[in-house]
Amino acid sequence: MSVTVAALGARTTPAEQALDLLAERPLVVLTGAGLSTDSGIPDYRGPGAPARMPMTYQEFVSGPVPQQRYWARSHLGWSRMRRADPNPGHRAVAALGAELVITQNVDGLHEACGTPSLIALHGRIADVICLGCRTTSSRSRLHERMAVANPGWAEERAVVEVRPDGDVELEETAGFVVPACEGCGGALKPDVVFFGENVPKPRVERCYAAVDAVAASSGALLVAGSSLTVMSGLRFVRRAAKVGVPVVIVNRGSTRGDDLATHRVDVGTSDWLPRLATRRKRTPISR
C-alpha cells in the first residue's frame, strides 16, 4: 500500500521511514524529468506544467517539413540546454552507490556529474544519428553547422521555454536550413527515443536484470522525479513490485505507480535526495 507525505516532518513520517528503508540496501534508481527542473529544464507533467505533446517518431521520419520544424526549434533549445548544470539531486544520485541508475532524461546531466553505472534509457540529446547510414556524431558539431547555415537565427528569436527533450515553443520555422549527414547525405535525428519509437532491447534487459539482482539481495527501487506516465519507466516499477522489491517514489504530484509504492514522498528531489546520500554515507552498505 502506498503511503504519502507532503513534507519532511518528524522521524515517524513515511519520508523518514523511506530514508531508513533505503539507507543500507542495494539500490536501483529510476529518474525522470522532475529531477532536472531545478537545473532550469521544465518537465512535461509536473504540477503546473503546461500541456505539451512532443513530436512522434512517425511524424519525424515522414519527411523534410517536420524535420525542419523539429531542428529549428531544437537548435534554439540546445543553445540553452547545453549550458544547464547538475543540481543537488543529480549529485546526490551520483553519490548513492546504486547498482544501476536508469534515467528517462536525455539532458546528459547525470553524465555531467559522473554518475556511475548509468543507463540513459531514452538516449542522449548530445548525440545525433543518421537515418541513412546509422552513423552517430556529436550534437555540438551539428549545432555549429546549423549556426553557419542559419546566420542570426538564434539571435533573432527569443526562447520562451525549453522542453525536456531540447525543443522550444516556436511556431514559425520556415526557411531554417537543416544540414544533412556529412557522410552519406541522409537525414539526421537526435539519438534519442521519440514517442512511438521503441527503447533498444539490450537497455531494457539490463534494467530488468538490475531489478532482479536487487530482489535477490534484499534491495530496493527508488523512483526520483518521474510521474511514470509512460510505460518505458513504469514497467520497472511493476517488475519490482512483482518480485517483492520495495519501491520508494519521490516526486512532486501523483504518479502512475503510486499504488505499487511502499512509500510515496511528495517533495522535491533536490531537497530529499541529498539527505538520502548523507544517510547512506554514514551507514556502510553491506553486499
Image: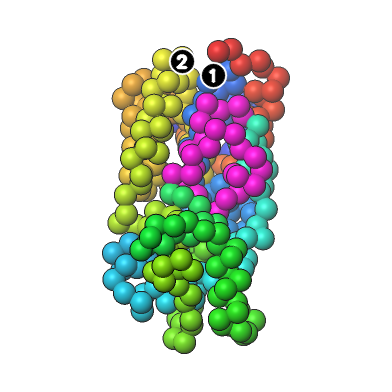
Q: Nearer the viewer, residue 115 or 255?
A: 115
The percent coordinates of residue 106 (x first, y second) are 50, 52
**Mark 1 burial class by Cα count in 10 Å: few <14, some 14-19, many 20+:** many
Task: Kindly tell me whether residue 183 is visible in this rendering.
Answer: yes
Relative side of 159 to 73, left or right: right
Magenta stretch bounds:
96-121
**Mark 2 burial class by Cα count in 10 Å: few <14, some 14-19, many 20+:** some
Check residue 108 for magenta coloring.
yes
Q: Quadrant of residue 277?
A: top right
Q: Are marks 1 and 2 in contact (CB under 8 Å)?
A: yes
Sequence-earlier tag: 1 or 2: 1
Q: Please tell me the numbered disc located at residue 25.
A: 1
Query: Which kind of residue does numbered mark 1 sit on?
Result: Arg
Q: Residue at x 30, y 56 (%)?
A: 196
The percent coordinates of residue 15 (x first, y second) are 56, 30
Q: Is residue 276 above or below residue 138?
A: above
Query: Which kind of residue does numbered mark 2 sit on?
Result: Ser
The percent coordinates of residue 210 (x first, y second) are 43, 27
Relative side of 125 to 110, left or right: left
Task: Kindly tell me whether residue 78 is visible in this rendering.
Answer: no
Q: Please tell me the numbered disc located at residue 218.
A: 2
